[in-house]
């Protein structure tokens, strides 16, 4: 069973998207957004302790160009990623 789950909605999106994390056990997490060139363009949090539970973060992408993005969630030694599309 996964210790953490990651999803975005809507996907594709225009101005903003909601990032949801379902954490089954407390952990230190880092959540970042990477563009299609592999550049980190936004850090939502880095090495932050979160308790078990559901968490939501709204990413305002009104200044980001249209394109494909990757959300990376690092939990200990594990990295999860999810692609999503911004349509401006």
Image (cartoon, helix red, strand yellow):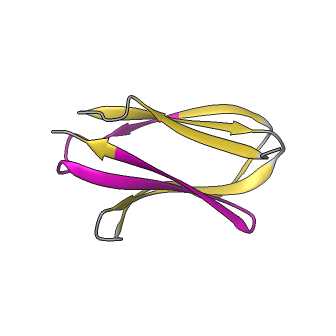
Tell me where residue 36 sits by quadrant.
Answer: bottom left
What secondary structure is the stretch in magenta mostly built from? strand
Q: Where does the magenta region start and end?
A: 57-84
Observer-nearest of 79 and 41:
79
The percent coordinates of residue 48 (x first, y second) are: 67, 55
Q: Position of residue 53 (x, y in %)?
A: 75, 32
Left or right, 2 with reference to 58: right
Q: Quadrant of the C terminus?
A: top left
Quarter of the image with the N terminus in it: top right
11 vs 30, left or right, is left
The verdict on residue 77 being magenta is yes
Is residue 41 one of those drawn in magenta? no
Q: Closer to the camera, 32 or 66?
A: 66
**Residue under the point 24% across and 33% down:** 15
Q: Is residue 20 above or below residue 32?
A: above
Q: Residue at x 63, y 33 (%)?
A: 55
Which x, y percent locates residue 68?
29, 53
């Amino acid at each position: 069973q996964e210790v953490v789950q990651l999803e975005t909605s809507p996907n594709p999106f225009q101005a903003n998207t909601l990032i949801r994390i379902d954490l089954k056990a407390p952990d230190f997490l880092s959540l970042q957004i990477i563009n299609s060139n592999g550049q980190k363009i936004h850090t939502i949090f880095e090495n932050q302790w979160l308790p078990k539970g559901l968490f939501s973060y709204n990413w305002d992408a009104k200044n980001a160009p249209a394109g494909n993005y990757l959300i990376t969630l690092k939990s200990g030694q594990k990295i999860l990623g999810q692609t999503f599309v911004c349509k401006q």
